[in-house]
Amino acid sequence: MNQEIRNLEPKALWNHFTDLNAVPRPSKKEEKVREFMKDFGQKLGLETLEDKIGNVIIKKPATQGMEDRKTLILQSHLDMVHQKNNDTNFDFATQGIEMEVVDGWVKAKGTTLGADNGIGVAAIMAILSSNEIEHPAIEALFTIDEETGMTGAKHLDGSLFKGKILLNLDTEEDNEIGIGCAGGVDVTAERTYELQHTQSEEMSLKITVKGLTGGHSGMEIHKGLGNANKILGELINSISDDYKINEVDGGGLRNAIPREAHAVLVLENVSTAEREVEDKAWEIKDKLKDTDPNLTVLIEASEEEPTNSISVEDSKAFTKMLIETHNGVFKMSPEIEGLVEASNNLARVILKDGKATIQCLTRSSVEESKEEVAQRLTETFENTGFTVMKEGDYPGWAPNRESEILAELKTLYKEMFKEEPHVAACHAGLECGIISEHIPGLDMVSFGPTILGAHSPDEKVNIESTQKFWKFLLSILKNTPKK
């Protein structure tokens, strides 16, 4: 199937994307892809560097006649979100992505595709390896760990760069030029519960939520998509009798809207609980029928009860906390129509053997509202006996509508596609604001092809849109401003 991808146009880009996707590259496990990129640059005879944190930099001189143009920094991140369907047998640490073409889109089989941000990486590779494309001097920056902490951008060695224009190739709508983004902070809550032994008259009830759409916890947080952890909380809360929680396991990565979750409960009147949960499940399915048509709730009773659980009181409080934890849009921007200012994703919920961990990703383009959301979460968790930590804080990217490179791109876009581009800030976390702290004075924009379902196994990139993106990128290179 991957051979089918190699035959797509532009072939250079798709061939590099296929080569890249053959290399395992989940976030925080980029050793193999870093070596792949260094080997790529060295084989081309180009200056290839790696800074102390692991970012790879490949430099290419200007083509003949382009020496008088400003140096461009072309930037994309090497890592990808590793999400798969439960019934997909796949190891992101050792396997390459299996791809296919479906109705004009490239997608993966049961896993994330890695078009975010592999298409950007592949485009830069195609430019670096070409002997025909006109371009100014290029400093290609391939950052690590963008998806789970922006570690590469945070620890970038800015002294390695001379360029003052940065093109970030990590936007997911082909008619959009990005000029700003949200910052974020990881909020984590932990506590330990005292366990109780199961009584002989008690049975177990397993509730499983699956089949949700999922997606990017920034770009798609405003769509009202179902969150498996929140739904699980609602289902458990529908039970009128006393219950004790043995186990909860829901969600995955902080930057992905949770698609699956399950809980194991211990209680006496299982049949009543089954009916109540089933009634609530139908209510939730009806509410989410447009956004999450494949939502499935499984309810399974068993006489083989777990050996222990947390108390009824603690179980009720834990469920109440899931209900009260803010998830989704917190505030819309009063300045930019349609832009989410602040949000939270209740990303991961684990309770096993009495040890509980809650993981959230809070985003905002305004520092004050980011802190407001984080503080509200802190109060919710601390009121339930949790200890709260805030880590991985990173700044947003403030829009500059007077940008010289923005003006150039707007003109080129209109000339090429006979329409105005959509100039916007986004609620995702791009690396631009962080990179600019290490390379002062950068003029920055972000753009890319149309990608849907990023951070979920439904991720796909549009083939025609990728061709449009490639054509636009080549035009930008050719028309880079003079020094």
Image (cartoon, rainbow, N blue to C red):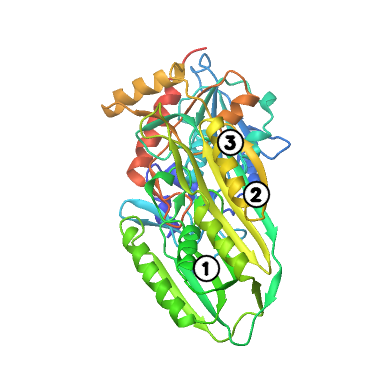
Res. 148 visible in picture: no
Residue, x 36% and y 46% (percent of image)? 462
Q: Position of residue 45 (x, y in %)?
A: 63, 34
Amino acid of disc 3:
Glu
Note whether 150 is above or below 231 in the view shown: above
- Name the residue beneath numbered marker 2: 28
Bin the neighbour count of mark 3 within 10 Å (Cα to Cα): few under 14, some 14-19, many 20 and up. some
Of label 2 and label 1, which has the lower sequence position? 2
Residue, x 50% and y 28% (percent of image)? 167
Q: Secondary structure at mark 1?
A: strand
Q: Kindly identify which numbered label has been placed on residue 371.
A: 3
Distance of label 3 from label 1 (alpha carbons): 30 Å
Note whether 274 is above or below 101 in the view shown: below
Q: Kindly identify which numbered label has been placed on residue 209.
A: none
Of label 3 and label 2, which has the lower sequence position? 2
Distance of label 2 from label 1 (alpha carbons): 26 Å
Res. 136 visible in picture: yes
Bin the neighbour count of mark 1 within 10 Å (Cα to Cα): few under 14, some 14-19, many 20 and up. many
Q: Is residue 417 left or right of residue 113?
A: left
Q: Secondary structure at mark 2?
A: loop
Q: Nearer the viewer, residue 50 or 452?
A: 452
Callout 3–callout 2 Cβ contact below 8 Å: no
Distance of label 3 from label 2 (alpha carbons): 26 Å
- Name the residue beneath numbered marker 1: 262
Q: Is residue 255 left or right of residue 49?
A: left
Which of the two discs, 3 and 2, sits closer to the camera?
Answer: 3
Q: Quadrant of the N terminus?
A: bottom left
